[in-house]
Image (cartoon, rainbow, N blue to C red):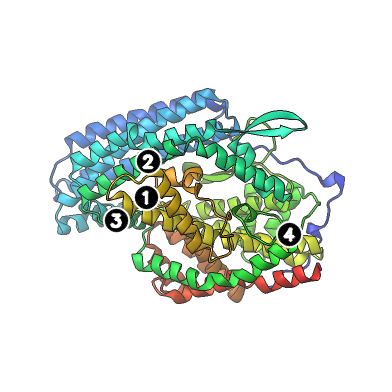
Amino acid sequence: MTHHNTDQMKAPHASQQGQAPRWEIESIFPGGSKSPQYAAFRQEMVKEIDKLEKALAKLPKKLDETSRPKWTKWILDLQAAYEKLHLASSFAGCLTSQDVNDEEAMRIDAEIDDQASRWGMMKATLESFSVKASNREWQKLLQKKGIREISFHLDEMRDRAKMKMPEELEKLAIELGVNGYHSWNRLYDKMAGDLRVTLDDVGQKKEISLGQNAPRMSDRDREVRRDAFEKMVGAWKMRENLAAIALNSQGGFRLSIYKRRGWEDPLFEPLLNARMKRATIEAMWSAVVKGRPQLKPYVDAKMKYLGIDKFRWYDQEAPLGKSDRKISFDEAGRFIVEHLKSFSDEMGDFTSMALDKRWIEAEDRTGKAGGGWCSRIAIRKESRIFMTYTGTFSGLSTLAHELGHAYHGWVLKDNPPFAAMYPMNLAETASIFNELRVTDAALAASSNFDEKLMLTDQKLANGLTFMSNIHARFIFDSRFYEERKKGTVARERLNEIMKEAQKEAFFGILDEHDGYHPLFWASKLHFFITGAPFYNFPYTFGYLFANGVYDRAIKEGKTFATNYRDLLADTGRLTTEEVAKKHLGVDLTKEDFWRDAVDRVCADVAPFVKLVNQAD
């Protein structure tokens, strides 16, 4: 599979500079948060949840010949309610992101959370019922039309329920979680959102938020990066005691629940969520630890180019090379379509459709939320993408990434809702695949030295993030939970654990004296996300897994496109290891696949070093 030189990456004429679009969401519910149709949809949804609750109370407590049709209907109705909740929630997310001051949308979002909690309570009852049913009766239920297609999800639910507390205690945990456990997450978000740093702007003092300070961490000027880092650390020093209380409290809550369920290992739940074996994560990290020293010449060359003799935390995102060329949104879209279509006609056609139908909110304007995401609008078999397009290669890459998520959703559009729920570690497959594709295409198309340097550095900086920065987070979490079992972990000790984790994960490249970031545990919101414990390793998994899949695509070309599509289609109805075995013929519990993926990432080191040497 070769990338042809293309004139689409050349500087566009001014006439080609099309504005980045606003998305089309009126067709979902016209009128935004004041939409009468949206209000009617939510009212209908509440009525259905009421009906489900009443029907559940009347259902026979035993699964047998006579009760089977009733339970079948109720489970399928529960699934239909989930799909409606998902649509209501996705639309609220669109509204709160496109306008952060839409208070009505925020109120609606909270209202949907309440309904989701009611739905979760009914699911807990179903879990409990499934455990009480005999294996024979349960298997008969799974053969029923409509149920058979979601049997993987229901079996998984039943297996997990067997490992949980009695139904009443699980419901109590859900209830206490709303105002207890998850409150620590909300409190942390509020605390982080309120923190400010002061800048000296031409002799005038200016206060900015940590979010506004963050882009300064990747500034070309090292002094700006250092100042941004020190100010961020200074801000968190004022809150580290509170952050330590929050982290200990939510960690303690989790461990109490685990103890009641008989889950000894803090990794038990995250691995369950990832549909993954412990042997897989161990094989992955083992391959990473052995392979990442190959990145050392990259870091040495980067330091040489930057003219620095010590690598510090704030040098990780230091940009190299540059491209002053602005890429219009239309041009970015055409470039992505061209290079996806050269692998898969369907991917190219789908991406064209998503762009033509304006599924993407990309306009650069005030009042929008930050970041980028893709959300499925499942009932309509559509997706919506939220981002702010910047006219740079980074913007093009983000667009390709989110379009990958949308393609994954497209592949799953005909699966029943319960067979379209895939774990976080497999969620990044299509998005990173797209990113790798367009980055390689841009590299092949570019003859500009600075551009080539920038693109190769971006690829390797990603490798360093996923193989060192995220591994440090994983090591920290693992050690924190071990110590938290014995009691509260003091703030000073949290700093020590984090520094030890960074020493280990960054294989000696960070300066021993002041190259570390001991307060990273406080400043990184991922540690405080109560919705998912160990919010770290799925990223590294997704990155390396996508690299392995992409490698196969390069070797096999267009003939791999159907297999790739089938792989994505199965992410909602097979375990992680089964997906890899069925579609790639590999065993993820062995190091071979992971070693190849790590080597693939590190293959850019030699070309990068060569480029830096040319700059002398």
Viewer-nearest residue: 449 or 134? 449
Which residue position is annotated with label 4?
306
Q: Are marks 3 and 1 in contact (CB under 8 Å)?
A: no
Write the residue at 79% across / 61% down.
450
Residue 418 - label = 1
Write the residue at 42% across / 29% down.
110
Is tag 2's residue or tag 4's residue first in the polypeptide sequence?
A: 2
* Amino acid under disc 3: Glu
| The N terminus - image quarter | bottom right
Eye-nearest disc, 2 or 4? 4
Apparent side of residue 597 relative to residue 114 in the rendered image (left or right): right
Quadrant in the rendering for residue 49: top left
The residue tagged with tag 4: helix, strand or loop? helix
Q: Are marks 4 and 3 in contact (CB under 8 Å)?
A: no
Write the residue at 50% across / 74% down.
595
Give how far apart the Cα atoms at labels 3 and 1 are: 11 Å
Is tag 3's residue or tag 2's residue first in the polypeptide sequence?
A: 2
Is residue 107 among what the camera can see?
yes
Is tag 4's residue or tag 1's residue first in the polypeptide sequence?
A: 4
* Amino acid under disc 4: Leu
Which residue position is annotated with label 3?
156
Q: Are marks 2 and 1 in contact (CB under 8 Å)?
A: yes
Which residue position is annotated with label 2?
82
Eye-nearest disc, 4 or 3? 4
The residue tagged with tag 1: helix, strand or loop? helix
The residue tagged with tag 2: helix, strand or loop? helix
Seen in the picture, residue 522 relative to 476 is either above or below; the reply is above
